[in-house]
Image: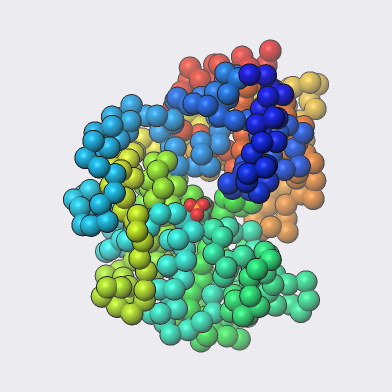
Amino acid sequence: MSSSSQTQLFERAKQTVPGGVHSPVRGFKGLVSTPRFIARAEGAHLWDVEDKSYIDFCMSFGPLILGHRDPEVEDTLHSAIKRGWSYGASEPYSLELAEFLLERLPFVDQIRFVNSGTEAVMTALRLARGATGRNKILKFNGCYHGHVDAMLIKAGSGLAGQAEASSAGVPKGVSDDTLVLDLNDREGLKECFTREGDQIAAIIIEPLPANNGLLIQDLEFLKLCRELTSKSGALLIFDEVISGFRVAFGGMVEKTGIKPDIVTYGKIIGGGLPVGALAASKELMGHLAPLGPVYQAGTLSANPLAMAGGLATLKKIAQADFYQTLDRQTEALVQLLERWTQEFDGGRFSFLRWIRMGSLFWPVRADHDPKSLNELPASLSEDFTPFFEEFLKRGVYLAPNAYEVGFASLAHTNEVLAELEQRLFT
Ligand SMILES: *Cc1c(COP(=O)(O)O)cnc(C)c1O
């Protein structure tokens, strides 16, 4: 198949599916190329339907921290599938995963598995409201929490502090109950709690915001979130759908030592199969059905195949030295990328530098150090397009959007880096 036939596949997909894709970022909107149709993957590589290979730095937007088709995960899935792939009943596989996780996440007592990060957030918000008897949720511009109504809210263009929906179809009543502030706005946060702290059920934050570039927060800001919620009887929700198991096994809770009331997980927890989870104290989790009045359910929740895939992945990353190895590999990777942006085509991209946190990395204008959405360079997408296209042409696949971070995996070995150097520099 030729590349033009991938364009044809995309045209066909647009006939049956809105925009030709099942999740918007996959649509290559604003880019020159049209979506690659991926036929298969292994390790750090993807192959499209015309058999062109790419070194993958999207890694399914984060879940594949071991790379594609890690042999141990693959073997586990093969044996799991022979036992059946959905029972809608109690089974030992989710029990094993829950016990494995809780042993290693000492800041929570109980966990419930759902099917996606969005679902985990949706349930966490309902739990916070149900447990506190309050309605308002405070979120931050620039954090992404999935596509639940209450989170598709941005700062309003009108009066300060007023929020509005960032998507059509979100009722005004929902945006009225969501408060929005800028990340790193300590004064705004204090004022907000002075004004209406007694109505706030929870703050929800990505403790490492990684959905609008990599907006690394000051520890002080996260501490203030903890302080103000504790004082006012609100809960603190850490949305660790990206950062959980990514920056450390215990995510940003482990990294910062700040203990939130509820943690949401997704992505890595399923190792590439659809899993999300929320975890909290036994007391809080007791509000959930069937024990308590906060309803939550799922036909495919704790799907045994997904539980097995998740456990096989997490067992591997819980091993000693895993994060040191990943860190070392990513540092070498970022140094290589840094050299490329400085040298390529007479320094054509030398206005960029790379921000890294663990195995997450992201290019931004060298004169910017953004901690909030409004500090992003206005030219972000414009800067990204030629750069993305150059990579794609050379067989290097980045997530097709300027706001998405890069994900490295265990499969991005020295050998792969040598291949990357070849592809980028020749
Ligand atoms: C990806 C993500 C979500 C949504 O998870 P889905 O599985 O895509 O529904 C929520 N929160 C954060 C921080 C995420 O990165």
Q: How many marks?
A: 0
In-front residue for pair 337/297? 297
- Looking at the image, residue 293 sits to the left or right of residue 47; the answer is left
In-front residue for pair 129/275? 275
Give the vertical position of 140 relative to 390 (above or below): below
Q: Position of residue 423 (x, y in %)?
A: 63, 17
Is residue 364 something that shows in the picture? no
Image quadrant in which you'd find residue 281: bottom left
- Looking at the image, residue 269 sits to the left or right of residue 217; the answer is left
Q: Position of residue 317 (x, y in %)?
A: 34, 38
Image quadrant in which you'd find residue 98: bottom left
Residue at position x 66%, y 78% in the image: 172
In-front residue for pair 124/21? 21
- Looking at the image, residue 12 sits to the left or right of residue 44; the answer is right
Q: Residue furthest left?
A: 92
Q: Position of residue 78 (x, y in %)?
A: 28, 32
What colouring style does the render use?
A: rainbow
Quarter of the figure that contains the N terminus: top right
Is residue 122 something that shows in the picture? yes
- Looking at the image, residue 224 sits to the left or right of residue 127; the answer is right
Q: Position of residue 214 (x, y in %)?
A: 60, 48
Residue at position x 25%, y 42% in the image: 84
Give the vertical position of 49 relative to 174 (above or below): above
Residue at position x 57%, y 68% in the image: 149
Image quadrant in which you'd find residue 151: bottom right
Residue at position x 66%, y 36% in the image: 12
Quarter of the figure that contains the C terminus: top right
Give the vertical position of 221 relative to 19 (above or below): below
